[in-house]
Image: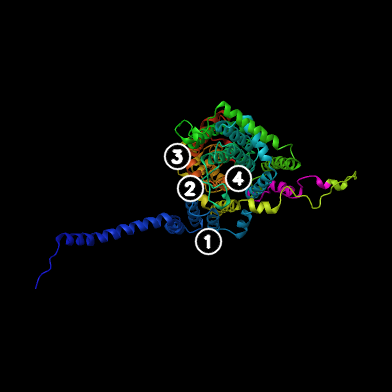
């Protein structure tokens, strides 16, 4: 019997193949898991976060730490953008309702807050602005006056927003500026200078996913940031300033009143300085200022011939718009009326006492809704007046009622309704912290630093309030924390103006998330800026804001109130429990 010949080379190959097969399977398994994680990391994080933070729920015997648990869960969701904003908002509302942190009446009152109603009213006014095209007329005029340089245009727009937000709320300011900025960008796109969105099939824009370019993110984030920065300059510009005045004067009845001139002299230089620094940062971050190798910076230079040609095109386009129509005049008048009503209501709010306004930051009415009703009623032209004229020949009468300056079909299709859920959720979560007495735990945290110097304690307050206001409406943060900070000041023998002012200014400057202020939410929803873009771009403004507020409170305040570092006698007479 012959023995078959075995090829050693073949045997070696078979053995190598068999020995390497488990390794190949292992590599494939790791690859599959890596692909799975890349595809489903948001779902994994969404489900794992409540489980990982669950031990917090069982700390303490009251609802304070369970409420903190819900707050941290939603904070992780907002920071990582694990789901659509509406889903995160509903998750926060669902968790708060399940754990019964407060009565359902408070939730319903939160969803009719002034900030939410103002935001809804402004978004409807935005629809009316775009419907009448008055923003195109203003956009062309601005480009004709200041040219196509992004440095000049952004400077004018950002500082105009700053000045306007000093007198009206940042919601109305940002809402009015949004259509104007978009129209300017669209005109620049028609001139071939920039692209508003990346990777778009212009013939099928509505069916494709589009991403805003660096220029778009630069302008709109600048508008959102400027509307918040301007609000810190005056008592009328931000509700946090009004709440500070109300709580301070009620808690310390014998203290000097917070006067408008003193407050403006203190904060206006800080607002201007911070605006300049943020302007430089955004130009550096998005447009490559001081970095000539960036593609964005290379697109901003034009020859004299190109500039003259652009001006000719813009002049022709502006002339084609013709005279100002009745429609445009009505919408413009309504915008002015909304601003005037806003200033008037802010003045009335500062006259309230704290006990009369315990929930006034929630229940106070929104004047912008009055203007919205007018837009639904006023027609876009005066054709109906022909019915009252004496017939002098063949007078053509209209066969249908005149259209109004705003109608529901436009509103329901154009308003980003997700913004309302975001605002309601941010208010709900932080109101739950106050109702569950978690803010008292924060007061204990502040007391740890009573032995520190006043400037160091101010820095701690600024950083904490700046962080909290990223995840909740700034007025809710100020309303919840200021009474506790006042008590800390009395215990630690620090001038209450010192730390309360630090908390107030820091609470007015959210730069990272849409939950911090309705202005951020409107900007992100209006042009679909990815939340990650605002999260990363906000690091520079946040650092600058902390340093600017800290310098204002610790250094510049001495020029306005020379005795601010001394513990005054009037602080001993207070209404604190």
Nearest to the observer: residue 130 or residue 162 = 130
Label disc, if present, on residue 429 of the rendered structure = none
Q: How many angstroms separate mark 1 from mark 4 (CA)? A: 33 Å
Q: Earlier in the sequence, mark 3 or mark 4?
A: 3
Q: Which label lies toward us, 1 or 3?
A: 1
Task: Give how far apart the Cα atoms at labels 2 and 1 are.
Answer: 24 Å
The label number, if any, that marks residue 575 in the structure image: 4
* Residue 483, image x, y percentages: 57, 45
**Displayed quadrant of residue 486:** top right
Residue depicted at x 81% and y 50%: 398
What is the magenta segment's predominant secondary structure? helix
Q: Earlier in the sequence, mark 3 or mark 2?
A: 2
Give the CA separation, mark 3 to mark 4.
24 Å
* Quadrant position of residue 172: top right
Q: Which of marks 4 and 2 precedes in the sequence?
A: 2
Q: Which residues are magenta?
A: 360-384
Label 4's element?
Answer: loop
Residue closer to the observer: 352 or 137: 137
């Amino acid at each position: 019997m012959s023995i078959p010949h075995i090829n050693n080379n073949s045997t070696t190959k078979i053995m190598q193949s068999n020995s390497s097969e488990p390794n190949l399977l292992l590599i494939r398994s790791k690859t599959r898991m890596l692909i799975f994680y890349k595809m489903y990391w948001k779902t994994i994080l969404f489900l794992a976060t409540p489980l990982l933070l669950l031990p917090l729920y069982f700390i303490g015997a009251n609802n304070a730490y369970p409420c903190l648990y819900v707050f941290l869960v939603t904070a992780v969701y907002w920071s990582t953008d694990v789901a659509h904003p509406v889903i995160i908002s509903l998750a926060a509302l669902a968790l708060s309702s399940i754990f019964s942190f407060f009565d359902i009446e408070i939730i319903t009152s939160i969803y009719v807050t002034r900030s939410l109603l103002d935001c809804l009213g402004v978004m409807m006014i935005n629809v009316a602005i775009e419907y009448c095209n008055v923003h195109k007329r203003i956009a062309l005029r601005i480009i004709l006056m200041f040219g196509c340089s992004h440095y000049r245009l952004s400077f004018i727009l950002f500082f105009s927003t700053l000045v306007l937000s000093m007198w009206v709320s940042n919601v109305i300011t940002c809402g009015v500026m949004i259509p104007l900025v978009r129209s300017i960008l669209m005109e620049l796109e028609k001139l071939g200078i920039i692209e508003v969105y990346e990777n778009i099939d212009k013939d099928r824009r509505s069916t494709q996913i589009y991403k805003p370019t660096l220029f778009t993110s630069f302008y709109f984030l600048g508008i959102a940031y400027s509307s918040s920065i301007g609000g810190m300059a005056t008592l009328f510009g931000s509700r946090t300033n009004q709440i500070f005045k109300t709580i301070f004067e009620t808690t310390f009845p014998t203290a000097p009143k917070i006067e408008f001139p003193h407050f403006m002299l203190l904060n206006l230089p800080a607002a201007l300085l911070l605006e300049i620094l943020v302007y430089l940062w955004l130009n550096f971050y998005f447009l490559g200022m001081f970095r000539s190798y960036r593609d964005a910076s290379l697109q901003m230079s034009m020859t004299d011939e190109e500039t003259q040609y652009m001006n000719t095109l813009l002049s022709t386009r502006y002339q084609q718009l013709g005279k100002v129509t009745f429609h445009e005049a009505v919408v413009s008048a309504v915008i002015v009326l909304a601003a005037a009503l806003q200033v008037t209501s802010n003045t009335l709010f500062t006259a309230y006492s704290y006990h009369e306004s315990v929930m006034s930051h929630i229940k106070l009415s929104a004047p912008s809704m009055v203007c919205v009703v007018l837009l639904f009623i006023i027609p876009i032209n005066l054709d109906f007046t022909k019915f009252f004229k004496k017939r002098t020949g063949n007078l053509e009468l209209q066969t249908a009622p005149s259209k109004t300056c705003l109608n529901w079909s436009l509103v329901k299709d154009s308003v980003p309704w997700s913004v309302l859920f975001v605002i309601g959720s941010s208010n709900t979560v932080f109101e739950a912290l106050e109702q569950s007495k978690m803010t008292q735990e924060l007061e204990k945290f502040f007391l740890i630093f009573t032995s520190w110097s006043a400037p160091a304690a101010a820095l701690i307050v600024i950083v904490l309030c700046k962080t909290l206001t990223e995840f909740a409406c700034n007025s809710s943060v100020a309303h919840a924390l200021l009474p506790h900070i006042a008590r800390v000041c009395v215990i630690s023998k620090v001038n209450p103006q010192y730390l309360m002012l630090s908390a107030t200014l820091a609470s007015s400057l959210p730069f990272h998330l849409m939950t911090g202020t309705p202005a951020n939410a409107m900007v992100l929803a209006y042009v679909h800026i990815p939340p990650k873009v605002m999260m990363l771009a906000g690091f520079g403004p946040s650092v600058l804001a902390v340093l600017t507020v800290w310098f204002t409170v610790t250094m510049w305040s001495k020029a306005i109130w020379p005795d601010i570092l001394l513990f005054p006698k009037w602080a001993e007479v207070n209404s604190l429990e």
